Image: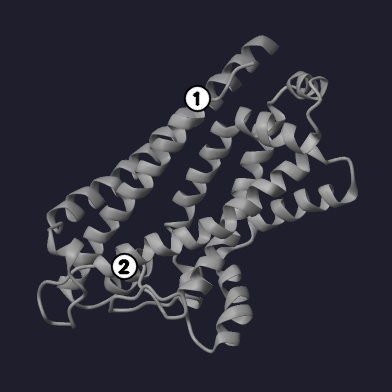
């Protein structure tokens, strides 16, 4: 009797899992299908080479937003990648102290903070101090989002490196810092690169922090102390506008952004498969 009840319970739970999977896949393909159909139909060359046009004037593009997104991501990477990797190395290699515990704890808390709060924090810290929105403020906000992702990826990758590898390096007379740089980090590099790619994919889809930091611009701008356009904010502005032309550009821009994020995720999966086996 107990066996029959357990079997029925198991079948019910399995059915719920399958139903949840089908439901999730259905909505995923629904969203992606809408994005592909409406995005591809609005895609054209001018989107990549022209600046936005005023409301009511047909044509125009989001070339400045594409360049702005790349610039913001580069700024975030320059700040966030070294800090994230160093924090992960410290947690794993020097983890037997209170500071390492606090580093891990802060990283975990930071990963759960809503990104809009990070945007408000950077707004108070940088935007108010500079008295203007800027690409630098946007890059700093995105770098804060990147740091816990890279820290966790670095920590998990370095934990997979066997202690025997470290001990072999010590036996050859290498100091700890050289062992970390020459042996440990290269051994866990594929996992670290995967984390970096995932972090870039995450920040490229962020809108809320940029509304408080880099804002937006309808012009070309590569200056770090000036507002700059980004794909996510442009999509938000165009999608909520009453102009059909702008809404079509928002669909096409969404398609471009989705393709960039998809490519980054594919690269992340590719590097994850290359993890070294000891």
Image quarter of residue 147: bottom right
Pick the front one: 65 or 179: 179
Question: Residue 1, can we see it?
Answer: no
Residue 230's spot in the image, x, y percent?
A: 36, 68
Q: CA distance from mark 1 to mark 2?
A: 34 Å
* 27 w.r.t. 65: above or below: above
Pick the front one: 165 or 178: 178
Disc 2 element: helix
- At a point 76% along the width and 44% down the height, the residue shown is 90
- At a point 38% along the width and 59% down the height, the residue shown is 70
* 178 w.r.t. 34: above or below: above
Q: Quadrant of the N terminus?
A: top right
Residue 15's spot in the image, x, y percent?
A: 48, 26
- At a point 48% along the width and 57% down the height, the residue shown is 203
Q: Quadrant of the C terminus?
A: top right
Question: Residue 53, can we see it?
Answer: yes
Q: How is the image coloured?
A: one colour
Residue 122's spot in the image, x, y percent?
A: 59, 74
Disc 1 element: loop
Which label number is shown at residue 65?
Answer: 2
Q: Residue furthest front?
A: 173
Residue 218's spot in the image, x, y percent?
A: 28, 79
Pick the front one: 155 or 17: 155
Pick the front one: 15 or 177: 177
Which label number is shown at residue 274?
Answer: 1
Q: Residues within 10 Å of mark 1 (few under 14, many from 20)?
A: few
Q: Residues within 10 Å of mark 2 (few under 14, many from 20)?
A: many
Image quarter of residue 162: top right
- At a point 62% along the width and 81% down the height, the residue shown is 124
Q: Is residue 217 left or right of residue 46?
A: right
Q: Is residue 273 left or right of residue 254?
A: right
């Amino acid at each position: 009797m107990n066996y029959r009840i357990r079997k029925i319970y198991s079948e019910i739970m399995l059915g719920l899992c399958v139903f949840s999977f089908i439901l999730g896949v259905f909505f995923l393909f629904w969203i992606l299908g809408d994005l592909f159909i409406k995005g591809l139909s609005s895609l054209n060359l001018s989107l990549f080479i022209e600046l936005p046009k005023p409301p009511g004037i047909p044509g125009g593009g989001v070339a400045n937003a594409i360049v702005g997104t790349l610039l913001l991501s580069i700024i975030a990477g320059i700040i966030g990648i070294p800090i994230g990797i160093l924090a992960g190395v410290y947690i794993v290699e020097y983890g037997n102290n209170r500071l390492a515990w606090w580093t891990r704890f802060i990283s975990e808390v930071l990963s759960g903070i809503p990104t809009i709060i990070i945007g408000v924090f950077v707004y108070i810290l940088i935007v108010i101090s500079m008295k203007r929105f800027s690409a630098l403020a946007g890059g700093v906000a995105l770098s804060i989002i990147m740091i816990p992702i890279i820290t966790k990826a670095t920590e998990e990758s370095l934990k997979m490196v066997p202690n025997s590898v470290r001990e072999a390096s010590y036996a050859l007379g290498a100091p700890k810092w050289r062992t970390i740089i020459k042996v440990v980090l290269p051994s866990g590099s594929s996992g670290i690169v995967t984390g970096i790619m995932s972090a870039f994919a995450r920040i490229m889809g962020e809108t809320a922090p940029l509304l408080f930091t880099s804002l937006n611009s309808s012009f070309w701008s590569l200056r770090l102390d000036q507002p700059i356009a980004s794909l996510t904010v442009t999509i938000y502005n165009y999608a909520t506008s009453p102009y059909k032309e702008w809404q079509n550009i928002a669909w096409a821009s969404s398609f471009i952004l989705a393709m960039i994020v998809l490519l980054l995720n594919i690269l992340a999966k590719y590097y994850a498969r290359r993890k070294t086996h000891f």
